[in-house]
Amino acid sequence: MSLLQILFNSLALGSVYALVALGFVLVVNATGAVNFAHGDLVMAGGYAAVFFGSWLGLPLILLLPLVAVAMFILGVAVCFLAYFPLLKRPPSSVFISTLLCGIMLENGYIVMFGPEIKAGPPLLTTGSLDLPPISLSIQSLATIGVAGLLIALQYLVFFRTQLGRRLRAVSQDREMAQAIGIPAFTLIAVTFGVGTALAGIAGAVLSNQFFVSPTGGVSLSIYGYIAVVIGGWGSILGAVVGALIIALFQVGASTVVPYTVATGGLYVALLVILFLRPQGVFGERVQRRV
Amino acid sequence: MSVSNVGSEPLPRQRGVGALRWLGRGINLPLLIGAAAFAAYASGAGPYDLRLISIAGIYAILVIGFQFVFGYAGAISLAQSCFFGLGAYITGVLGARYGLEATITFPLSIVGPALLAALVAYTVLRLEDQYFALATLSISLLVQLVVTQWQTVTGGTNGLSGIPGITLFGWTIASRWGTMVAVWVLVVVAGVLAFQITRGLYGRAFHLMRESLPVASALGLDVARMRFAAFVLSAGYAGAAGSLIAHVVHVVSPEQVGLPLMITCLTMTVIGGRLSVAGAVLGAVAIVYLQEQFRSLQNYTLIAYGGVTLAFVIAAPYGLIGALERLRGMITAPRRGAVPTAQPIPRPAAMTRPQGPALLSVVGVVKSFGGVRALDDVSLSLQPSEIVGLIGPNGSGKTTLLNVISGLYESDAGRLEFLGQDATRLPAFRIARLGMARTFQHIHLVEDMSVVDNIALGRATAEGVGLKNAIAAFHRDDGLDRARGIAISAARMLGVEQHATTLCGGLAYGTRRRVEVARAIAAAPQLLLLDEPAAGLNEEEQRDLAARIRSIAALGVAVLVVEHNLVFLGALAERLVCLDQGRLIADDTPDAVRSHPKVVEAYLGAPA
Amino acid sequence: MSDRTIARTRPGMLRHPIHLGLGLVALTVAPAAAWAADAYLPIVLPVTGFMSVEGGSQRNGALMAIEHAPASLKAEAPVFDTGTSATGAATALDKALSEKPALAASVSVFGTEMVAMAPMAQDYQVPLLTISGLAQLTETGNPYIFRFLPNDREIKVAHARYVVEKLNKTKPALIGDTTAYGQGGFKLLQEDFAKLNINLAMAESVEPDTRDMSSIVAKIKESGADVLVIHTVAQPMALLIKQARTAGLDIPIVTSSSLVEPQATALFDPAELKSTCSETPSAPEARATPEISAWADAYEARFKQPPDGLALGQYDGVMMALSLIAGGATTPDLLAKALNTTTYKGVAMTYKSNGKGDMAHNAEIVCWDGTSRIPKIAADYSGDELTLK
């Protein structure tokens, strides 16, 4: 397989992972908490796409706003259920509460949609553009486009708007932000909502090429986590870069070694990175405050 | 032992009355009744129930082990199920394929995971929380991968069957009842061992470590070694539990290494209680039975299970045990324990040795953060019994200097000598053990522990606190008693003796400050570093504290006090050192420093 | 006590000689056995978790058989969920078998769970009726295991033979996965191709949750394979087929039965399934015989979803047990003996034990022609054809 094809496929898969990691890092930033239900929320988006697709019969690109809104609401719900009640507790409590939310979500999907695998509607259409030596699937192209747009949008909002500035203030020091009048809790809920909307879009986009299943999200939570660690804890750019690295690893490494070795290699690589440079690619070495 | 019981623990003397008093304390009586009821139920149970009870016992051992790393060391280790599965596989493979007995496979199932933990410890233990969780998860996933791929040995994803029951010296425990008894005997052993390890000064040291790592290090606690011990212990316990599940289910498969079991382990720990053996047992039994009860709901099972557990996590932060104790506390007020008898604070050993040119010698220290020079060629020295004040405007580097001296920061250049030894590259806990103690701007005390126990932690290193000693101190922990005795003396010196058995959580700010200083002097240091001790105190408290510090110095202790409050320092310090923007600009008597032109300029700005 | 005494006459019951015979026997002993036999036949399988599709089908098949039980039987079959773990399965079977004395139990299709449950059958001395294909279950001398779908060993022979003898291919690419199902079949196929003197062009396994198959497709292309043989669970199989076709890989594909499940074919446009075939024990969706057709209609009416081979296999197994019980095998040991010696004509095929508990010895190859999601039968293997020396 040509190098170009590998790169293109990695980019397509990586775009989806990047959306997942982006949603994950937003919540990490705002709350310092690892949301282990994040992958299950990605599946929620996939199921939403399946549901709206079969109900309205439109291509996914038109359904995305609906999916985003539904996921936003779900994200806020998770925030109220798993995060706000545990504000004063150590972070391990939030870890556990999000894990439990994940379990409830997974089994909720089985109850609502059945345990089978489902496929959602394509973004535009199936089929591909053939430009030898590579074949560009239209779904992949559309995926890259949507992801790129959302990442750019996210970056703009975060770094160029007042809302973004306030979000960053809340993530750096919540009490201080509240002291100067920023409605921190509202913004945290908004962050959960936006993070989940991104996850949901990722899931919706995944659903056509890669299917939706009740337990399909678990590995995505892990990939999001790894991406954020490799890229740099709390860094948006780092999350995207980390996600692309994972995709490249999965697609690229498995062309030369057996697939299971590539998977093992990813974990070993992660451990090596944690050993040598725990702050990741874009992270900062933090001196502990005394 | 639960944390909230800690402060009210008396020193038991008489046997009979002591036992009665033990029953009346906390929730010991209900727990004993519950245990008796459980035993009665177990003795008459059918095969299905026997299996459940055995599984509950196995998970109890798993959770007791997990409490070391998760409850005591405060780290989310996601490798606990991996160690469990490893223990299961060791017993399974050796038992099914090679017919080895439990007398061999059981110890190997403990040693194997413990070795793996020791191997990876260096990589993962120094990571911060969020990385540690992911690192341990990766290890778990790697082990799962190896186990599923190494089909010739492990049977692949289908697993291995035909694992015999527990065989000891040729005699196999064939009945389910016998197996259950064997499992629960081990639960008792595991619980007693865990209780033994954590009930004394060693266990209390973990509470402080969780509260603040730098503070624990500054008291001389080797936190890296403590986390290592907790991690390896948890792995060993998990391996033991895994070995037992192989004997009960007669099958090992990759699911025993996986994430779902890890989630169950976490859930049991959180539901039962993170720090108590009784909590571990309670959590294990509760979850095993809950899962079975909900099975009939089929697809709604796990939704209900998740919801109930989540409600519990939110409503009961200290788990079932904590909730029970709270309930008990509402019925009768917890009885305060007796105050220990005071023992004199020993003189620091080195006092009798001849001194070098100075007690503490700081030469040309440089420390930068990013592009900012926080300390620029700073030199100073201290003699025994000297009280020196360190002043300077905000951002001048005072706390940074204190951190460098106490070893929390490593200087970029320069030299640090303490008691004649080169301390430039020593980590904080080693410097502390040489004879240095300090306080911090933000007071870190263990809220759930009594004043006397908090102060007693200052004696932890002197008592040689560590895993071996904890296990060896068989009936009573003499170290804890001695430490408490000395702690009372320290408390007396700081005037907080009357609060000895009060939990620190409820104290006023000024009292907390004095407790913190008492903790520092309980360590019998030769050099005491105080970081803004007068902040937040009213005038009377300040005068009081100054007097007490003078009396400490009179014993031969050198004191370096960082302060803004020149009035406070005026009564206290013989010498003032002034920093400005990282540079030392004055080092002289208080009067001279106060009128020094550079000092005035630093505080008030240059004359117009 | 849940009552499952809905005794409806099974369509066409009297058409089958064995049932007629048994019915006559029952009539003659009726006065002596005037008390209707109480049969407790618990169903122990994964209702929740990632095996719940397969477990659900199996459960449906068993339940339908209970509902079609002969009138002289009062059959009771509560369902116990095993979840997805061996430990959970053992506990569930414990619960099921210790509640009341059971005559037999319908148990999990999931191989890993069967490994834990099989020894328990010997402890309780109760026959287990399963459709798990895991070869080792009948290779340990356990007299209480009866499986009603072909042993994986046999069905993989059909799989390999079709590729080599019917399609005349000489360079297969073999793809498995790391699940228990995948690992078992992978090994068996490797052995079978070796016995047929065929060298594999390539062989590799993927993780079942793999999403992007481009590297595997690339390796298949590079190996110059002339046929793609897949033995995995449904999701990676579907992804691989789709992505292979999109990448222009036109060689024929012959898969294991995971693709035949209606929920799997639902993921495809019919055109995507062209030149694809699967081995399967039976394909009720293809409705090849009137009996299967009638049964499939009854299943759809009852459960509102299309049937699959798993449900049919379990149905036949439970029906066989029920008819033997009605015919006088009123203790577990009698039932086990009867299961071992009786020939039973079920809906999908005729069942007879090979002495080790393998009851089913018939496999089919079905193929899709690109016009419909319902495949057609392309080849049939039975008896000796399912072994390779």
Image (cartoon, grey):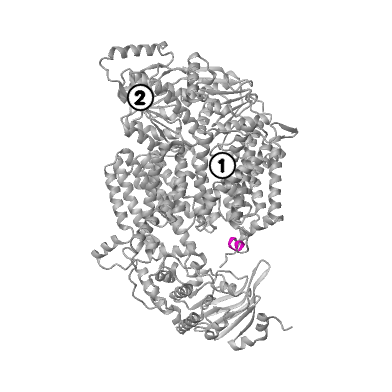
Q: Which residue is mark 1?
A: A217
State the residue at coordinates (36%, 23%). C5
Labelled pair 1, 2 in contact (Cβ < 8 Å): no
The residue that label 2 is drawn on is C75
Residue C70 placement (x, y as % from top left): 36, 18
Region of the chain picked out in magenta, as a range: A174-178
Q: For the stretch drawn in magenta, what is the main secondary structure?
A: helix
Q: Tell me, for residue B570, which label it has, or none.
A: none
Q: Chain of mark 1?
A: A
Mark 1 packing: few (<14 Cα in 10 Å), some, or many (20+)?
many
Please state the chain letter of the residue tagged with numbered disc 2 in the rendered image: C
Asked which secondary structure carries label 1, the reply is: helix
Please report the residue visible at 43 percent of the width from the left and 21 percent of the height from the top. C316
Q: Is residue C302 above or below residue B22?
A: above
Residue furthest to the right: A131
Q: Amino acid at mark 1?
A: Gly
Q: Residue furthest left?
A: B16
Residue occupying image coordinates x 60% and y 42%: A70
The residue under the point 47% across, 76% down is B525
Front residue (pair A221, C156)? A221
**Cα separation between marks 1 and 2:** 41 Å
**Along the horizontal axis of the image, is C312 left or right of A231?**
left
